[in-house]
Amino acid sequence: MRILLHNDDIEAWRDALTERLPDAEIVTADDPAEQRRDADYLAVWKPPAALLREQSRARGIINLGAGVDALLNNPARPEGVPIVKLRDAG
């Protein structure tokens, strides 16, 4: 399973996901295109359209910030891919 991260706190998210999902391949938007292309899941906040266009096999998108308007209005958002919005637990 490949998970693509894009947000302002990539290192903290990478560390947390690596610890909890040791068998997953965690890549970031800063990695070369051939590494980040075709992720299974996207954990993102306001991803650029070019990054979304690389994702032809995404099975789910986790929105890492408040509001999903930027994601919903992104013209490159993969069609039919479920979006999950994180909620503040406290």
Image (cartoon, grey):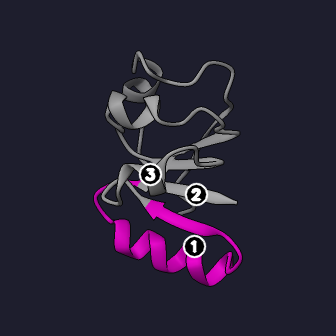
Q: Mark 1: which secondary structure?
A: helix
Residue 40 locus on image (x, y percent): 66, 48
Q: Is residue 13 left or right of residue 31?
A: right
Residue lying at 34% horizontally and 31% vertically, measured from the top left: 50
Mark 1 or 2, closer to the camera:
2
Q: Position of residue 58 (x, y in %)?
A: 64, 38
Say which element carries label 3: helix
Give the image quarter of residue 76: top left
In the rendered image, residue 76 lying in the magenta stretch gets the answer: no
In the visual, does 59 lie left or right of 17? right
Residue on which the image places disc 1: 17
Magenta-highlighted residues: 6-27
- The residue under label 3 is which amino acid type? Glu
- Asked whether the residues under the numbered discs 1 and 3 touch, taking CB atoms below 8 Å apart as contact, a structural biologist would say no
Label 2, residues with CA under 10 Å away: few <14, some 14-19, many ≥20:
many
Residue annotated with mark 2: 3
Q: Is residue 36 visible?
A: yes
Q: Is residue 66 above or below residue 75?
A: below
Q: Quadrant of the N terminus?
A: bottom right
Q: Are marks 1 and 2 in contact (CB under 8 Å)?
A: yes
The kind of secondary structure element at disc 2 is strand
20 shown above or below 82: below
Residue at position x 49%, y 24% in the image? 77
Amino acid under label 2? Ile
**Residue 64 sits above or below residue 13 on the image:** above
Residue 67 visible in rendering = no
Numbered mark located on residue 34 in the image: 3
Of label 1 and label 2, which has the lower sequence position? Answer: 2
Residue 67 screen position, x and y as percent: 43, 34
- Spatial CA span between label 3 and label 2: 14 Å
* Magenta-colored stretch includes residue 13: yes
